[in-house]
Amino acid sequence: MSSAPLTDTLQETLAIFEEGGAPRTTSEVAEQFDLGRRSAYERLERLVDHDRLETKKVGGNGRVWWRPATDERATTRDAVESEFDEVYDRISDGFYALDEEFRFRYLNDHAADVLGLDETAIGADIRDEVVLTEAFETALNGALETKEAVIFEDYYHPVDRWFHNAIYPSESGLSVYFYEITEQKRRERELTRYETIVETSPIGITIVGSDGEIQFTNDRAEEIFGRSRSRINALSFDDPRWDEVDEDGEPLSREELPFLRIVESGELLLDQVSGVLRPDGERVWISVNGAPVYDDRGEIESVVFSIEDITKRREQQRALEESERRYRTLVDHFPNGAVGLYDEDLTYDIVGGELLEDLGFNPDEVAGTTIHDRYPDELVDRMEPNFRDVFDGESSSFDIDLGDRDLLAHTLPVRNADDEIYAGMLVVQDVTERWEYQRRLEESNERLEQFAYAASHDLQEPLRMVRSYLQLIENRYGNALDEDGEEFLEYAVDGAERMRQMINGLLEYSRVDTRGDPFEPVDLNDVLDDVCEDLQMRIDESNAEITTDDLPCVDGDDGQLRRVFQNLLSNAIEYSRDEPPQVDVSATRDDDQWIISVQDNGIGIDLDEQERIFEVFQRLHTHEEHSGTGIGLALSRRIVERHGGEIWVDSEPGEGATFSFTLPAVDT
């Protein structure tokens, strides 16, 4: 103990204690002298060293201090102990003491209020009076067994609050201090939510301090800028490595940079588009929004930015604009026609095309009007069903007579990226000249057909006369003719017969379109069976082998298709080599049509002759080499074309030939 005189500071501190008065806590002394707890503690310890104050440890690490009496009426130490209750009750935190059996020895008013207890709880087991969490009971046992303090946070369900708990072991049991941290927990949860939102946001977020240095960057900003958080935070807002440019690619001046614009104006910045350079040399285009953050003095302490990567959107927008320019050019210059888009109200959104100008329509005046505004009622009645059908996914074509113009119109649905129909398209073409040409062509064909029929019909009679007189000569004078005469007569009869066949073939060729039967489902297996039966004698004589796949059902003219098969099989047998003919008939599906192929092992056809053989009266061989009129393949082509198909040959000399033709399939 020291008997040295007290300094003024210690005298001042001692003066607040009355002899035999109530004890004071370290916090109370610190608050009275506006000191930190440590400074107050050091003063009080020095007064204890001078034997002017006494002290006692309370709880785990708390202390109380008092000034003992010096006369006969001095407060005894037991009396001082009795003052502790007042000290504990003045403590704003909850406090209670337990013995080694976890029975209450003491609890202050705040603890009693929180736990819902009163003085009757003294001596009762805390486990019987209070609903303890598993964590709390574990902490009590741990502090008692280890004689070490246990500090933890715990949620107390009965009052729906969080508390910070400190359990200190003592000689007689445990001292428990607690104070509420519910608001702190709420703020922590909010902070966690905010952090989660910020870190998982698809938008880049940065914070720039008032000095222009970047203070914070989230993960998305790292991805956008192509830099790690530490590298971004090491850059200032105006670092030249950003190489920031405007939408036209021109460098931003310092005054145009988002940070300075906000700092100078003190206002929000919305959707400023610029491009910044990544370390890899790629330029990323961003949309920047920013807001100032003010301190208590009303001065800007930082600026918060949200940054959206719009590089792809910008590219798509530019591609869309370019596409729109192309389509606008196409629409405006649509050759010999017009095109327009319309909505479900049948209102034109966009129109264009050279035909509009020819008809005296202004595209700008047509856009925004409906078909009811533009056309006569009788024309609307014809057009409207086709216009509306597109919104059910149907396309259609129809004719329009507009003055002296013949127009062909097509309506079709327009779909977006999600395959949803959002508009209809009208495409109109001026077919006046085409249809006039078609009418003239039809009239010409009709006259040619009449001529061919008349010619072939009129030739039949003199031909019959020639054949009849040749037969009379043969019957009456055959025995009188020498060998040369008989040969000459045979040539004449054969020529007349070939002339008859050619005339009949020409007549059949001219009637393909006009004398054919209506199309109906035709089973090609039945057709082939009938043809093979008709050719059975030739098949037997040539010892031909004909194989076939299972043939399909097609839409066509049964009689004409029989003629095609008959021509192709006859040729395959006729133009065989020395060995017996081998013919294979097959079918292959190709979308909405069938490809029928007839393959043989005959003499083949030179590549240069493969187109000529389908022309009328074109023969590759003499009559002495091979018989025929030269019209069979031409007739087959015309029949196939009438069925909407085409016919061709694949062949090499000496390697056989494969004749193929297409026919429309029948849906079953």
Image (cartoon, rainbow, N blue to C red):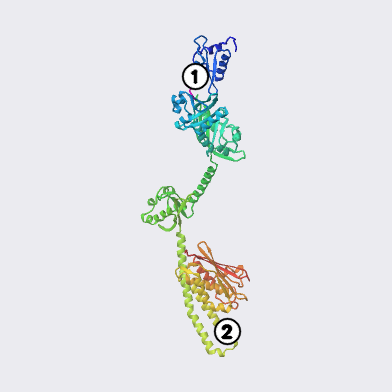
SS under mark 2: helix
Does the magenta portion include 86?
Answer: yes
Q: Is residue 511 visible?
A: no
Q: Which residues are magenta?
A: 81-95
Amino acid type at mark 1: Phe
Tags 1 and 2 touching, CB below 8 Å: no
Q: Which residue is mark 1?
A: 84
Q: Position of residue 288 (x, y in %)?
A: 52, 36
Image location (x, y in percent) of residue 115: 45, 28
- Against 40, residue 218 (above or below) is below
- Residue 318, given in percent of the width and then of the height, sits at 53, 44
Number of the label disc, if any, that sits on residue 488: 2
Give the x, y percent position of residue 406: 43, 59
Q: Is 629 placed above or below 392 here?
A: below
**Nearer the observer, 206 or 19:** 19
As helix, strand or loop, the secondary structure at mark 1 comes to helix
Q: CA distance from mark 1 to mark 2?
A: 157 Å
Foreground residue among 238 and 408? 238
Q: Which mark is residue 226?
A: none
Amino acid on which disc 2 is placed: Phe
